[in-house]
């Protein structure tokens, strides 16, 4: 084959899936880096299947369009660090080739160079002896070769040779007597391309030359891998609506809480995020700070601690500031801890976690300050053998939304993801009285003015002094602002000083009935001392 066309790209993707399907179990078995979680082959297979499904749903006019479809599908369905890197390989080729309909050897060599550049840039801390080493070797060997069939053959051969060298570059591989699992999967991708270009049909799981061995000669097979000493979870999500300049901040934040950090984009505003960490909540919260995370997936990297010496397997503990909220939480079947006053002893929070008598505890902290304290308490509780996950909340209404979707019938990690997504999807607002003169986003305020906040920012200033009419007007305005992004339920928490706000509730109920009849309204006491009213939209 002298040039590549869209049909050949489709045959290549199909061959990749077929070969990875035959090899994935063997690749899983040699997976020891970065953690021995025995899923690299399966992750590459699922990622490539997602890429192929996307391609089959399109009618590409040329090679560039076909590769763009593969890259989009791979990023959406990326599994694990290796899957994210594979998506960047496809994206790099697509970006380099643009709208080209037919591709010759030199252009494919250039595409591999771009693929290696993008894949490496997506990884926070690239390491020698990994899938990246194999990719760079293939791209380097293909450079300046000429004809497409020679480029394909040279890339596949060099990838296999680089794979053979991975134990020399990464001591953990040499100790286990295996080659890199991700690299072995990538060799299969290059082998499949070579087979399609050359017209060979003999490629399969038994087609393993000396440079494609899974194990090193003279070394016993690896034993059951030891669990990693630190990181407990793999957290992945797709990130959309990323704010300017936030990707670098996100990468730094994730690197600070974990390792194996990958931030990979599709060139159209979506990014696949991957990290191994202990703090699930912090990893998700970092994504919320940068944009809008979705398709959140959390996978334990180590076997969870046995629950034999605990009375319960799982529990939810909600940290709140008022007894009214605590009673509401307990009525929903969760444990509650009241953090009275501006400051409290974190040791009390540690004891509250221990008092759940559960092996696995999800902590919902009702605001950002409480989340910080709860994180420290969780670390101390884990020293006693409990597995503790913090779901970050910026307002009590987010905590209530998370608690509403809690389901013991789900697997523990799926339940955590559901609660985190519910909290993140809930917009929060509040009404409070200005204590002093200040300049806000919407103008100057003075003491006694009513401030309306949405997601922590002042969006409304109503001249004081506050009365039933001004409070009701302000509440309706804040809710209207929050409903611009749609919603089905408005939650109102009334503060200690809001006993006389029955008029506010009635005005808000009438307003929603007239302007948003599809939206339900629920009201509770328990906003606390600082806010007159807390509002949530979900």
Image (cartoon, helix red, strand yellow):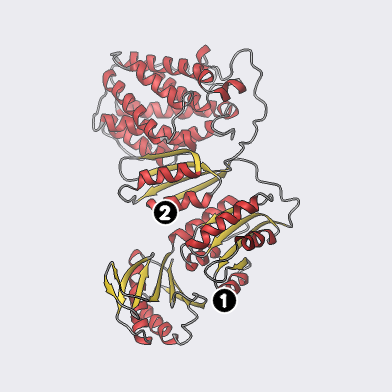
Q: Which residue is mark 2?
A: 288
The residue most toward the right is 309
**Please, is residue 249 above or below residue 535 in the view?**
above
Query: Cα distance, mark 1 to mark 2?
Result: 29 Å
Residue visible at 53% across and 23% down?
170
Q: Is residue 90 visible?
A: yes
Q: Is residue 196 visible?
A: no
**Please, is residue 185 above or below residue 65 in the view?**
above
Tags 1 and 2 in contact by the CB under 8 Å rule? Answer: no
Q: Secondary structure at mark 1?
A: helix
Pick the residue in front: 90 or 196.
90
Pick the residue in front: 227 or 438.
438
Q: Which residue is mark 1?
A: 324
Report the side of 175 relative to 53 (left or right): right
Badge 1: how crowded within 10 Å, few (<14), some, or many (20+)? Answer: some
- Tell me which numbered mark, 1 or 2, is placed earlier along the sequence: 2
Q: Secondary structure at mark 2?
A: helix
């Amino acid at each position: 084959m002298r040039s590549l066309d869209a049909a050949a790209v489709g045959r290549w993707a199909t061959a990749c899936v077929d070969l990875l399907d035959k090899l994935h179990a063997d690749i899983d078995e040699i997976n020891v880096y970065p953690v021995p979680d025995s899923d690299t082959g399966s992750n590459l297979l699922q990622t490539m299947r997602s890429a192929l499904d996307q391609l089959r749903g399109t009618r590409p006019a040329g090679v560039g369009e076909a590769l763009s479809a593969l890259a989009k599908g791979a990023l959406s369905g990326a599994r694990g660090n290796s899957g994210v890197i594979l998506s960047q390989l496809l994206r790099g080729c697509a970006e380099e080739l643009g709208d080209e309909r037919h591709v010759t050897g030199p252009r494919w060599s250039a595409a591999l160079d771009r693929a290696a550049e993008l894949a490496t840039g997506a990884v926070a801390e690239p390491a020698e002896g990994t899938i990246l080493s194999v990719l760079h070797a293939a791209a380097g060997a293909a450079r300046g070769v000429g004809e497409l069939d020679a480029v394909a053959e040279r890339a596949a051969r060099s990838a296999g040779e680089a794979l053979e060298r991975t134990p020399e570059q990464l001591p953990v591989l040499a100790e286990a007597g295996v080659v890199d699992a991700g690299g072995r999967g990538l060799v299969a991708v290059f082998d499949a391309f070579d087979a399609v270009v050359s017209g060979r049909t003999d490629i399969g799981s038994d087609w393993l030359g000396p440079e494609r061995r899974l194990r090193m000669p003279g070394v016993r097979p690896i034993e059951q891998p030891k669990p990693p000493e630190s990181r407990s979870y793999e957290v992945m999500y797709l990130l959309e609506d990323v704010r300017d300049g936030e990707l670098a901040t996100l990468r730094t934040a994730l690197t600070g809480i974990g390792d194996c950090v990958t931030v990979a984009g599709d060139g159209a505003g979506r990014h696949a995020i991957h990290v191994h960490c202990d703090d699930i909540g912090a990893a998700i919260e970092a994504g919320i700070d940068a944009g809008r995370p979705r398709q959140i997936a959390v996978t334990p990297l180590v076997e969870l601690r046995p629950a034999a010496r605990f009375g319960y397997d799982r529990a939810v503990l909600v940290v709140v500031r008022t007894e009214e909220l605590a009673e509401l939480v307990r009525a929903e079947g969760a444990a509650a801890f009241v953090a009275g006053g501006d400051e409290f002893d974190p040791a009390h929070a540690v004891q509250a976690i221990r008092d759940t008598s559960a092996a696995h505890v999800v902590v919902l902290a009702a605001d950002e300050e409480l989340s910080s304290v709860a994180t420290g308490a969780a670390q101390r509780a884990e020293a006693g053998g409990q597995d503790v996950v913090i779901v970050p909340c910026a307002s009590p209404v987010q905590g209530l939304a998370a608690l509403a979707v809690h389901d013991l019938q789900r697997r523990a990690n799926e339940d955590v993801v559901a609660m985190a997504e519910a909290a993140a999807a809930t917009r929060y607002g509040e009404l409070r009285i200005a204590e002093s003169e200040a300049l806000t986003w919407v103008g100057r305020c003075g003491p006694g003015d009513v401030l309306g906040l949405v997601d922590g920012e002042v969006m409304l200033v109503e001249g004081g002094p506050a009365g039933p009419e001004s409070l009701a007007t302000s509440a309706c305005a804040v809710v209207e602002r929050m409903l611009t992004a749609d919603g089905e339920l408005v939650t109102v928490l009334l503060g200690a000083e809001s006993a006389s706000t029955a008029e506010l509730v009635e005005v808000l109920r009438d307003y929603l009935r007239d302007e948003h009849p599809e939206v339900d309204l629920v009201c509770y006491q328990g906003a606390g001392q600082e806010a007159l009213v807390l509002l949530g939209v979900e």
